[in-house]
């Protein structure tokens, strides 16, 4: 049962309580789909206990949302038919400290109410998917998990209508993913290496680039003035300070390198402009222009090399980050292999492609790291859910092996790909097929014995007839005496047989189907009943 706390939402006591729990409003960030906070930022916040203060714009948005909620509440109460009370509730579920703050809850706890300020994002999601945005969906799934309510009535409005309304009920798969997601978040939060808590990135701005200064060329039939030598010396000094590609590791490093390349490009343009100005003053400035060309080419080559190195280094860093993320996922699979043995699933063949897709379009390293952290967490959550399914499937298959033998050489594949109900279906089907084959073998064996006995009797009868028709052979051939015919009292009639198996009934044709010879002697009735039971058991198994 959840615990209800008598704290006002938004109060200092409420904030202090939230700091000790995983809350419904944090569920979206934990699952990596919050438009306001990344999973890494949430980890940093929960680890430090320091909450980021909302800026003025967001605070105004909160206030508008509270005003709209207050205006919509009486209308919601009229439609639902019950009063709605704000509630803050906590519960420990599978070792997780969870909290949910509800905009409204009925007295019987069956219906929760969640109100959002209408926005274009909400409206678009409702039209396109018939569901609220996914960050709101995860919040409501968390609310239902903690409160135990049956459904959430989701409203979005500005407080005066129109009102967009949806009823949300828990989705079993989504609830399982939510619980596994919080478990993985808790493991990351308790990570002794604190690898998940990189400091929040500072805004990156390229450092000022000294540049090359201005190239001066004044001519009038001859060079009147030029600072070309000083300009060249400045260019050489600048190029000597060029960033080295192998040292680029942070967003700041890349920003500085790109700024240096931009300064080179600007210097090339200024040299070209100075040349054109000199040419306009006189034509014969070959030495000056040749020197200017050399400097411009030197700068251009340095710029091209730096731009190429920056691009290559960025790609190298992206690849290294993907490999590190993939290594963390493989470590999780390796740890599971120690527990599950032959049932352990292999890492997905598409792991690198999945991680690369997760950071597609991102340029800043901090953004790439955040997105990869979320992708790794998602892989770990999915692996935890798969492991739970495999454990249940393995238990079913191992129990079936112990009872029926090796009918499942593909047991690991079945446990990895099928849920419990599907595995039970496979077990029933294979056991029925096995019993049917076994019954058919037993019937075939009984038929073989019966035919062999008939053939033996026929041979002996033929031998006796041959001897009786040729007295000379009498005494020369040892023919077993004909078996005595059973006395009439030893033979059971159909009615007597049916009295043994009442209320069931059988006739001579049924006895032949069961491969039981006719007539049936009294001392054969037990064998006949056992054969009938085997036949009926096989049919029961096949039917279920």
Image (cartoon, helix red, strand yellow):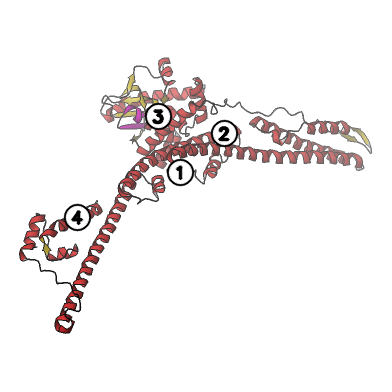
Q: Would you say residue 74 sits in the magenta stretch?
A: no
Left or right for 281, reference 516 = right
Nearer to the camera, 61 or 85: 85
* Visible residue check, residue 530: yes
Q: Earlier in the sequence, mark 4 or mark 2?
A: 2
* Mark pair 1, 2: CA separation: 26 Å
Select label 4 or label 3 by which is in front. 4
* Mark pair 3, 1: CA separation: 42 Å
Q: Earlier in the sequence, mark 4 or mark 1?
A: 1
* Visible residue check, residue 214: no
* Mark pair 3, 2: CA separation: 31 Å
Select label 3 or label 1 by which is in front. 1
* Mark pair 4, 3: CA separation: 63 Å
User: Which label belongs to residue 536?
Assistant: 4
Residue 397 picture quarter: top left
Residue 501 picture quarter: bottom left
Secondary structure beneath label 2: helix
Select label 3 or label 2 by which is in front. 2
Q: Which residue is mark 1?
A: 345
Magenta segment, which residues? 142-159
* Mark pair 4, 1: CA separation: 40 Å
Secondary structure beneath label 3: strand
Say which residue appears at 85% left-offset and 31% top-offset: 233
Q: Earlier in the sequence, mark 3 or mark 2?
A: 3
Say which residue appears at 43% left-offset and 30% top-offset: 183
Label 1 neighbourhood size at 10 Å, few (<14), some (14-19), many (20+)?
A: many
Q: Which residue is mark 3?
A: 116
């Amino acid at each position: 049962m959840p615990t209800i706390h008598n704290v006002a939402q938004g109060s200092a006591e409420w904030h202090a309580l939230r700091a000790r729990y995983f809350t419904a409003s944090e569920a979206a960030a934990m699952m990596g789909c919050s438009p306001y906070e990344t999973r890494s930022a949430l980890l940093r916040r929960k680890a430090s206990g320091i909450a980021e203060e909302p800026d003025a714009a967001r605070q105004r948005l909160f206030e508008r949302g509270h005003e709209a909620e207050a205006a919509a509440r009486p209308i919601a109460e009229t439609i639902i038919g019950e009063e709605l009370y704000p509630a803050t509730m906590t519960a420990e579920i599978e070792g997780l400290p969870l909290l949910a703050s509800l905009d409204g809850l009925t007295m019987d706890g069956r219906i929760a109410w969640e109100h959002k300020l209408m926005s274009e994002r909400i409206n678009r999601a409702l039209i396109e998917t018939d569901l609220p945005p996914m960050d709101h969906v995860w919040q409501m799934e968390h609310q239902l998990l903690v409160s135990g309510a049956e459904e959430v009535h989701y409203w979005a409005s500005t407080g005066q209508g129109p009102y967009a309304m949806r009823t949300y009920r828990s989705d079993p798969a989504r609830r399982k993913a939510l619980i596994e997601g919080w478990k993985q978040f808790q493991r990351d939060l308790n990570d002794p290496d604190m690898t998940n808590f990189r400091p929040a990135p500072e805004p990156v701005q390229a450092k000022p680039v000294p540049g090359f200064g201005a190239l001066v060329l004044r001519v009038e039939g001859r060079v009147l003035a030029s600072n070309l030598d000083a300009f060249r010396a400045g260019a050489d000094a600048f190029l000597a300070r060029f960033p080295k590609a192998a040292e680029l590791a942070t967003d700041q490093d890349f920003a500085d390198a790109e700024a240096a390349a931009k300064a080179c490009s600007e210097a090339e343009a200024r040299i070209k402009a100075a040349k054109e100005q000199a040419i306009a003053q006189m034509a014969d400035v070959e030495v000056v222009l040749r020197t200017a060309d050399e400097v411009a080419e030197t700068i251009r080559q340095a710029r091209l090399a730096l731009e190429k190195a920056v691009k290559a280094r960025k790609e190298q860093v992206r690849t290294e980050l993907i490999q590190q993320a993939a290594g963390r996922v493989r470590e999780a699979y390796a740890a599971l292999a120690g527990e599950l043995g032959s049932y352990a699933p292999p890492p997905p063949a598409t792991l690198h492609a999945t991680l690369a897709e997760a950071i597609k379009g991102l340029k800043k390293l901090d953004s790439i790291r955040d997105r990869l952290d979320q992708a790794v967490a998602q892989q770990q959550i999915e692996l935890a859910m798969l492991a739970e399914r495999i454990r249940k499937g393995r238990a079913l298959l191992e129990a079936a092996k112990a009872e029926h033998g090796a009918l499942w050489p593909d047991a690991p594949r079945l446990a990895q790909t099928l849920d419990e109900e599907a595995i039970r279906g496979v077990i029933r089907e294979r056991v029925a097929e096995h019993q049917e084959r076994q019954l058919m073998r037993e019937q075939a064996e009984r038929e073989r014995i019966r035919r062999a006995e008939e053939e033996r009797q026929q041979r002996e009868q033929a031998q006796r007839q041959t001897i009786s028709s040729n007295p000379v052979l009498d005494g020369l051939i040892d023919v077993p005496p004909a078996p005595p015919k059973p006395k009439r009292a030893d033979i059971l009639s159909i009615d007597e047989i049916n009295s043994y198996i009442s209320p069931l009934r059988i006739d001579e044709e049924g006895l032949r189907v069961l491969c039981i010879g006719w007539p049936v002697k009294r001392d054969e009735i037990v064998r006949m009943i056992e054969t009938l039971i085997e036949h009926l058991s096989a049919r029961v198994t096949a039917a279920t």
